[in-house]
Amino acid sequence: MSQTPYHPFGLDPEHLEFKNHFRRFVQNELAGIAEQADQEGRFPTEIYPLLREQGYLGIGFPETVGGSGGDLITASIFYEELTRASAGVSAGVFAHQHLACGPLAHFGTAEQKSTFFDPAIRGEKIGCFGLTEPDAGSDIRGMKTTARQDGDHYIINGSKLYITNGTIADFILVAARTGEARDRQGVSMFIVETSAPGFQSQLLDKIGNNSSSTALITLDNIAVSKDRLLGPEGKGLAQLKETLTDGRILVASRGLGIGQEAMELILDYAKQRKAFGQTIGKFEGVAFKVAEMAAKADAARLMIYRAARMRMAGEDGSKEASMAKLLASELAVSAATQSMLLHGGAGYMESMKVARLFRDAPEAWIGEGTNEIQLLVIAKQLGML
Ligand SMILES: Cc1cc2nc3c(=O)[nH]c(=O)nc-3n(C[C@H](O)[C@H](O)[C@H](O)COP(=O)(O)OP(=O)(O)OC[C@H]3O[C@@H](n4cnc5c(N)ncnc54)[C@H](O)[C@@H]3O)c2cc1C
């Protein structure tokens, strides 16, 4: 019988090589900085030169636009590994790299790319992405921020809530209404510099992801020239769909990173901690929970790679992306909780990494659309709603 070479999770050798290299880099170069930054409650911008030097900041972007190449599976591996070190840092990098740089690479003009994308992908400018508003989160079409045309400018008014990188960004991609309320063709994307008169940001206190900045942003009569419109007017929702579908795969990878790390932390601890004369991992009550985490992490990983492969093949993949995001974020929360509990009193101590995972995990439920919104996408595609 002829033998087919076995590649874990069907990954190509290049993916496996990237995973090994990047994992070592994260452990050796980033993990210490990330932990310190979490305690200090700040995003560590000093990681950008480190990521850039190794070509990691441009992962997922073709070399033709100044990226480092790598497909959506490579980008998924990048976010899984980065999140294992720090969900906060990975949230900041994700908002910058995927949410802000991604649409610029896809829809930006040559001038927009050279002014914003090129320095951003070198880590010299930081970007953020403003979609959510105080009265419009899941219900995107309920957005109230407006961009009114005035000669060769647009005047933008409104506010954006929970914006990652909001206090440290040099520019923000803003979704604003250029047409009638709730009109599918009535939303456009703009590039706004945070130095513009009328831009204000206010840092918000969170329960986790402490090494990321999250802000309320106010846009008060901000004048932007017409060449800051991203793509054609009225195409904002179509642009957002592209960004959010790939984004859900990457956010699923972030959830997987938390789940995998939580599983490996307790696997290690259960082999050392003793109770009743034996290591706690010898109790079935403990071992079965760890085994379940491992099985669910592998299942989430397979779902992520399936969705990524569909997107890479040019298929819609939005149902599969939502399915992966749903289950990977459930894994993040359940594995972080179980892992913390199985550490006993130690798991409740701030000095233990598992305590940080427990605080960070629930954001995986919310970002890139809550899990109810993922269920909505899946149910609609099943023809139910
Ligand atoms: C740490 C953090 C960082 C973030 N970063 C960014 C960012 O960088 N940029 C950005 O634009 N946004 C960002 N967000 C916002 C995030 O995308 C929204 O919070 C999310 O989409 C939910 O919107 P909402 O908070 O308004 O909740 P709501 O829409 O008010 O939802 C409240 C509850 O109702 C449920 N619900 C709503 N509609 C339905 C429905 N049709 N069926 C069933 N249930 C429903 C929701 O699932 C949720 O449980 C961030 C959020 C957090 C917490």
Image (cartoon, grey):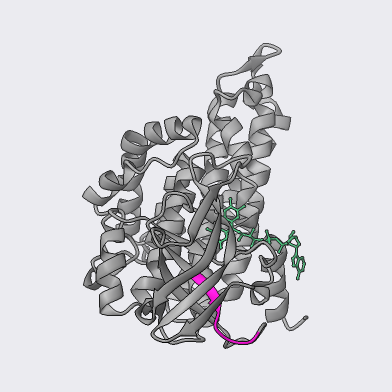
Query: Which range of residues does the magenta coloring cover?
Result: 174-180
Would residue 119 be found to the left or right of residue 26 on screen? left
Is residue 72 among the parts visible in the rendering?
Answer: no
- Asked if 293 appears above or below 113 in the picture, the reply is above
Between 315 and 95, the one nearer to me in the picture: 95
Ligand 1 found in image quarter:
bottom right
- Asked if 43 appears above or below 55 in the picture, the reply is above
The x, y position of residue 9, in whole percent, is 46, 58
The x, y position of residue 226, in whole percent, is 38, 82
The quadrant holding residue 266 is top right
Between 368 and 385, the one nearer to me in the picture: 368
Residue drawn at the location 47% of the way across and 41% of the way down:
86
Residue drawn at the location 31% of the way across and 66% of the way down:
116
The x, y position of residue 208, in whole percent, is 59, 40
Between 155 and 117, the one nearer to me in the picture: 155
Residue drawn at the location 53% of the way across and 65% of the way down:
220
The x, y position of residue 228, in whole percent, is 38, 76
Is 12 colored magenta in this rendering?
no
Residue drawn at the location 41% of the way across and 59% of the way down:
194
- Asked if 78 appears above or below 360 in the picture, the reply is below
Would residue 192 be found to the left or right of residue 54 on screen? right
The quadrant holding residue 283 is top right
Would residue 319 be found to the left or right of residue 201 on screen? right
Between 290 and 250, the one nearer to me in the picture: 250
Is residue 109 among the parts visible in the rendering?
Answer: yes
Q: Quadrant of the N terminus?
A: bottom left
Would residue 239 be found to the left or right of residue 110 on screen? right
